[in-house]
Amino acid sequence: MKKKFPISLHAALTLAGLAIALYMIFLYAPEEMTMGEVQRIFYIHVPSAWTALLGFLIIFCSSIAYLWKRSQFADELAQATAEVGFIFCTCVLVTGPLWAKPAWGIWWTWDARLTLTFLLWLLYVAYLMLRNYLINPGRAANLCAVVGVIGFVDVIIDYMAIRWWRTQHPQPVIGGGPGSGLDPRMATTLLVSWIAFVFLFFLLVRIRLGIAQMRRELGDIRHILAFRASED
Amino acid sequence: MASLKIIWNIFAKDLRVEWRNRETLASMCVFGLLIIFLFNFAFEGAREETLRLLPAVLWVAIAFAGVLGFNRSFASERENACLEGMTLAPVDPSLIFLGKMLANLLFLGVAEVVMVFAASLWYNFSFLPALGQLVLIAFFGTLGYAALGTIFGAIAANTRMREVMLTVLQFPIAFWILMLSIDSTADALRGNPSGDWWSGIARVAGISLVFTIASFLLFEYVLEE
Amino acid sequence: MLETRNLTKFFGDLAALKEVSFGITRGQSAFLYGPNGAGKTTLLRMLASLARPSSGQVLFDGRDIERDGTKAKAAIGFVSHTTFLYGELTVRENLKFFGSLFGLSGLEKKIDAALEMFDMRERSAVFARDLSRGLQQRTSLARAFLHDPDFVLLDEPFTGLDTQSVKKLEELLRRLPQQGKALLFSTHDFEQGAALAERLIALKAGRVRYNGRLAAAPFESLGIVRAAGPKADG
């Protein structure tokens, strides 16, 4: 992948994408009727949520791949994605109140998206804590993979359960329900922003993955040195 | 079947160990009772308010008492690396999971009976009219919760902050087991106003079974060195 | 035959075992000798499938135990520093539990026999947590012999034992090869090991320095200083 799509090109495209998205967010998309300028957070809030969800899907697939094939790469990918996904997830939870307070007068509501994102955030925290607090780091891959699988099963259940719960206990939805029509310019801006975010997400994952792989190579070299040490 | 015998032996061993100590079950009950007492005292109110609060209070108490029990379940294995000792034998790790899970299920179940009894006393509330439903909800809810608690207990035993790690894993993932159990319990205590008494149980059972099966399948990876 | 091929184990940056290759067959007795940190415990644990290799294999009768360790586990008895005993259970209950995990028939008789082997019959109703270190060691040994294993792996089995128990254990271990069993144990006391085993496996810094008949070992180059000649009796 490095040869076909070098990281420099990836970074350049990401930067370009983000620049275009920024332009569209602030200058192209029309102002929202009721909420005013603050509504523009929507173009960061929603793509971040999608990306965080995508992140956990990748963690799930890598975890399965690790348990099945014992692939070190799968484990490193899961680790990298967890850290980057966590950032995007936090972003959703930060932009949520920033948007909600000026727009609706409340800091928080347990609407579908925020609830799902918060539960997802807790899963990210649990995953990262497990990675970092193990007494024997050699077990990290196995244990984190198990949590990755169960965690994603939980995400699916979260999605279904929240939808059901909201039919029983309806609540205001931030940013309108799924059917609330979007002005075509807004829809385009959202799409562009989303693509830029996905590019950014994968760029950060690649960088983090690179670090993990360098660490592994360093560890391998240390192993070779340890091997040669005390040869008498 | 040989497997059933092994599951039974591990289950019986956990019970025997607990019987000699009698610490786990007692602390679970006391802890659960304290939570129920706290809420009872803080929110004295009319029957309608009781109906609103009681299911949540009960399941929160069960949730915390459960985590306490799961932690202790693996603490007893830690002293002489007994969990490792079990892997010396040609035993399928899933059987170890089932044995320990059933023990956790039993302890939490007993604690639940104690808590419900105390709650009905303090809240002047009778659970008898809806007893059949409540037993089913409690069984399935506790089953899924105990399954998760068993596998996460085994995972957390490898970390530096065991109790905290178990809690951090358990609550987000068992969240909907608890929520749906609370919801069904509330419905049952109100006498099923919507006329539908089984779909709540089915929901709880469905989610619990999904998590139980997932935990069962993944446990062997947790024990691998 | 229980053997390792290029067995390597890393703990972080530390290479505990470096490309260790050796094997032991039924009827043989060997002892692992080496300074602290040489890798004896790690090696024994890996043979007992309590730890996975970083690279290399452990084979039991030709099969990789990582892929399928059931037959290996059923044929191996392992004793280490950790006793694997439940403090809240009695000696007999501990043995009963472990025996049940092996799916043994006629368990009660086998427990009695194992207790007899290590003089623990009178104490079979004592809780494991109330036993002294030496008695716990004997219980642990009884547990290891319960399923009549073909391969007996012992990590410093004489620790904590009084002189009489040491003698009894030595007699027992000496008989194993005649019974068609394999014995592999580690010890700090060279003379003791030499008196019990025909083969020496010298380990240093994770590497095998010598693997062969005891009599032919180059003691000087291995850094082993022997007392006045090998002992004739135990």
Image (cartoon, coloured by chain):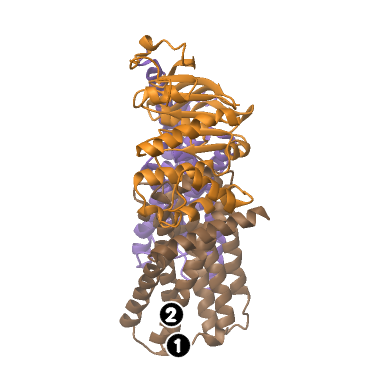
- The amino acid sitting under disc 1 is Phe
Q: Which mark is residue B54?
A: 2
- What x and y, as percent, mark residue C232? 43, 20
- What x and y, as percent, mark residue C208? 45, 18
Name which residue lies at 41% across and 75% down.
B57
- What x and y, as percent, mark residue A147? 49, 48
Q: Tag count in the figure?
A: 2
Q: Quadrant of the N terminus of chain B?
A: bottom right
Q: Element under label 2? A: helix
Q: Are marks 2 and 1 in contact (CB under 8 Å)?
A: yes
- Mark 1 is surrounded, within 10 Å at the Cα level, by few (under 14), some (14 to 19) or many (20 or more) other residues, namely some
Left or right of C71, for residue C140: left
Residue A204's quadrant in the figure? top left
Looking at the image, the residue that sits furthest to the front is: C233
Left or right of C153, for residue A221: left
Chain identity of mark 2: B
Chain identity of mark 1: B
Name which residue lies at 44% across and 12% down.
C217
Q: Is residue C216 above or below residue A163?
A: above
- What x and y, as percent, mark residue C165? 40, 39
User: Does label 2 or label 1 sit earlier along the sequence?
Assistant: 2
Q: Colour of chain C?
A: orange
- Give the residue number, with chain letter if any, for mark 1: B125
Q: Element under label 1? A: loop
Quick one: which chain is brown?
Answer: B
Looking at the image, the residue that sits furthest to the right is: B1
Q: Which mark is residue A8?
A: none
Quick one: which chain is purple?
Answer: A
- The amino acid sitting under disc 2 is Leu
